[in-house]
Image: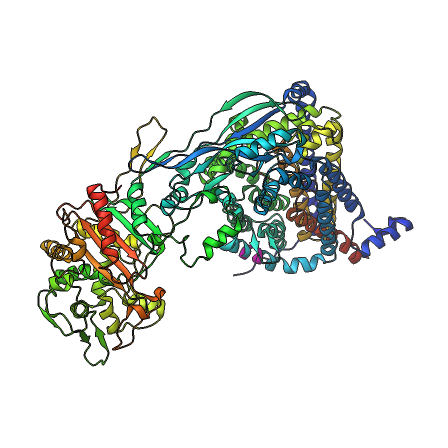
Amino acid sequence: MSIDSYSAANRRRYSLANSLHIDVPLLIGLLLTAALGLVILYSASNQNDDIIIRQLTRLAVAFGVMVMVAQISPQQLRFWTPWLFTIGIVLLIAVLAFGEGKGAQRWLDFGLLRFQPSEIIKITLPMILAWYLADTALPPKPSRVFVCIVLIIIPTLLIAKQPDLGTSLVIASSGIFVLLLSGIRWRYVFSAMLAAIAAAPLLWYFMHDYQRQRVLTFLNPEQDLLGSGWHIVQSKIAIGSGGLYGKGWLNGTQSHLEFLPERSTDFIFAVYGEEFGLMGILLLLILYLFVIARSLYISTQAQNTFGRLVGGSIAITFFFNIFVNIGMVTGLLPVVGLPLPLISYGGTSMVTLMIAFGILMSLHTHRKLLSQ
Amino acid sequence: MLRKLQIKDHGNETRLFKRRAIVAISVVIIMMLGIITRLVYLQIYNHQHFSTLSQKNRLKIVPLPPTRGLIYDRNGLLLAKNIPSFSLELIPEQVKDIDETLTRLGQLIAISDNDRQHFKRLVKQKRRFQSIPLRYRLTEEEVARFSVDRHLYKGVSIQARLIRYYPFSEMGVHTIGYVGRIDTRELQRINSTNYSATTHIGKLGIERSYEKELHGVVGYQQEEVNAQNRTLRIIDSTPPIAGKNLHLNIDIKLQAYASRILEGYRGSIVAIDPRNGELLTLVSNPSYDPNPFVTGIDIKSYNALRNSPDKPLFNRAILGQYPPGSTVKPFIGLAGLDAGLANSNLFCPGWFELEGDERRYRDWKKHGHGDTNLDKAIVQSCDVYFYELAKKLRITQMHKFMSLFGFGKKTGIDITGELPGLFPSREWKRKKRGQAWFPGETVITGIGQGFTLTTPLQLASATATLAMNGLHFRPSIVQSLQGSDDIKPILRQPTRYKSVLLKNPQNWQLVKQSMMRVLHSSRGTARSSGQDASYKIAGKTGTAQVFGIAQDAEYKEEEIDKRLRDHSLFIAFAPFKQPTIAIAVIAENGGSGGHVAAPIARKVLDAYLLGKEL
């Protein structure tokens, strides 16, 4: 594909966006989704202005960080990858040693700022795998795949030990997506899936009591009405009563009579489903699909294996988050406590997400500069 | 080895990736269709069903607090109970202007700044529709005053709640402890579901260490509410399971009596049943009333308690670490007998010197005890004899022997926070002080001075072990747990530690006889306390230096500031033949052990054994 085929007007627009290293379609997709998120949050928070202002601030910071990351060229990102990953692992170990958090140890406190090292790993695990696989021709040989699996397992176990099952699941998946994209044979993929199913009882053995409880609750929500079973029952009622067109913005009875717990965070999708109905949800899914498709397209256009693998993994992981959250809220999956990307109220994961999109933009915009 | 040359086929790789990307987007679309199918199922197919549920579903879950277990003493007297109390509560969602309402309420009912702050904190933590207590323990007058004006305060109500009450107030606080409002730190520790209706948690003592047993299991009820969130009826309920009742080994009457006897002194009295380690009495003076802590003590009163020079909040029985003074002598004597080093006589000139050292270690009796054997050394508390014995035993052997009695170790009592005291050793000094051990330090260790520190509880426990010829029990406060009022309590078996074994068991009798003569012979240091007793007591006095006295200077009580006077100590067990009580008494700055601590101990023993004055 050549730049020459663009019209002159397009070229000017792209060159301005390009010099800022911004991919306009992706940015528009993200902004629209975030805007829709604010509309929902306004209702979910019982029209609390404070929460909206805080979320707006977070969004501004997150988009700012995205633009900053986009300025870094993929070559530099690739160069720093091993260092960033190592730092992430060291911090994870530190969190197990000195971290703090409610019940689970997830946070590191540096006086001024507190953050979760698992957020670093979310980004750097796909990067380190892509960095490693990009050395040789694809598809990777079994020995290389084995090294990758070890690289995935280390942070996954460290985070699962905190214990943060939801995040460790997302991180393991983001690594697996890199492997899938790298072209390993489907035959291996299917046999691994069979092995995973066989190993499920083993996982049960390693789970904490509260995690087992969640699985049991998922299987039979009515038995734990004071805990997360109540969440699922209520959120299904909220979504189901929304119908095709919803009860209208700010009119959700489930949400506003406080039947629905964690309405602003993990269960915000239920508020949306109640107030905007199936049509509203379709709109949101289309926005998400656009962002995912654009991200995958950017990945296919990347100039080297590293960029392709990182970009592709970011796109699929983004979808994975969405799927797990909606699956949980609609009662398809157990409650694992993952936010709905760009919509749920909350800070840390939003910044991480936008860093990922910053990397995608960097992949795309620096490429064009080079080819010119 | 030849490195296999890999030529990267870029075209091929790009094609491969594109194929995979197409697979990925297809999977994404299929999964989205899956989500949509689920949503169609919920929102179209089952819409009627969920709509009805949502209409009717004004079902709400309300947690019900379990009743906290009661605490009884060994004779069945209630030490901690739950009494109904009226509290003023607000539902933030229903109050338009909280600050304005608080100000108006303040004119009806006294609301302190403390109440206000605590309320504000709770408002942030709890849901907006939950009722939040603003003030506890309203008087009947306050309830009446509010009831008249009630219609003016939407969202404000008076609720009857159970609050903890300690009828023996300051008599029991150092053992029983108290409950208080759950703070943010505790909030992270507890199971939030089980505590969803609970406002208080054990902060200290038994209330804290048996929190799990006392608390019980939360219940809940499903209530149907109307669109205004008002409860219409109760659909279903799972009753809470009340916490377990605790029966303590403590004899509260004896404890109260002991505390009265000790009045005027800062100090502690600990009494143990040596036959099983049951703790009969654990007194720390001065004490304080725990009841204000339950509903939130105001800052002024709290500071007064905290800054008081007498430190009433400090639990001396388990946290107070005192030099044991001469009370260690029976134990050191036993170590000497068992090592075969305490069979000979010694001449006591009133002082002791180590070879090649000018320093003189003085005896409390200026002109000495003259010819002294172990019996006389215990009965008259001769220091020189024990200086010499300690020198022969050496520190390592003393440390090993004393550890068997629990010196320098936590006793393992079932309330938290106990301190271990200290019995020094070469290793300890090298590790903690980075210094070598000096012979002079061995000498003073022999009379319980120097580095040695013990808690009153440790002294009582060691005395009990001695009384039982080495049978060593863990001191325990809780005797049994009772599931509910009509279920038989489950007795807890006493825990036994490793017994102290002597090479010659007859040595127990020798030392115990000497301890008996401390009270029942004409020269005993506590003879005045042994007179006219209808049973035989064995004991040992102790006078622990708080204040270093210069060489050759004389200790004159009147000249020394009261806070620097010696601590008065006494340990004892009785009756001599079949001991049923072992006791340790410490009166801070009380002076001589024989004059202060021993008479106090005698009174407590009389009360327990003869049932006098209770």
Residue B358 located left or right of residue B119: left
**Foreground residue, B187 or A354?**
B187
> In x, y percent, where is residue A293?
73, 40
The span picked out in magenta is: A86-90
Task: State the residue in front, B561 or A62.
Answer: B561
Give the number of marks. Answer: 0
The answer to whether B16 is drawn above or below residue B454 in the figure is: above
The colour scheme is rainbow
Residue B149: percent from left, percent from top:
64, 31
Q: Measuring 63% from the left and 54% from the top, which residue is drawn there?
A: A134
Q: Residue A335: which quarter of the image?
A: top right
Look at the magenta stretch and give its main secondary structure: helix
Q: Quadrant of the C terminus of chain A?
A: bottom right
From the viewer's perspective, tell me whether residue A51 is left or right of residue B280. right
From this view, report whether residue A143 is shown above or below residue B549.
above
Q: Is A165 positioned to the left or the right of B351 in the image?
A: right
In depth, the one of B569 and A79 nearer the eye is B569
Residue A332 in sight here = no
At 11% from the left and 55% from the top, the residue drawn is: B513
In depth, the one of A201 and B80 nearer the eye is B80
Q: Say left or right for A309 vs B358.
A: right
Q: Position of residue A26 (x, y in %)?
A: 77, 45
Is residue A89 shown in magenta? yes
Find out whether residue B225 is within the magenta segment.
no
Asked if one can make out residue A244 in the rendered structure from this viewpoint, the answer is: yes
Which percent across, then down, holds residue B152?
67, 31
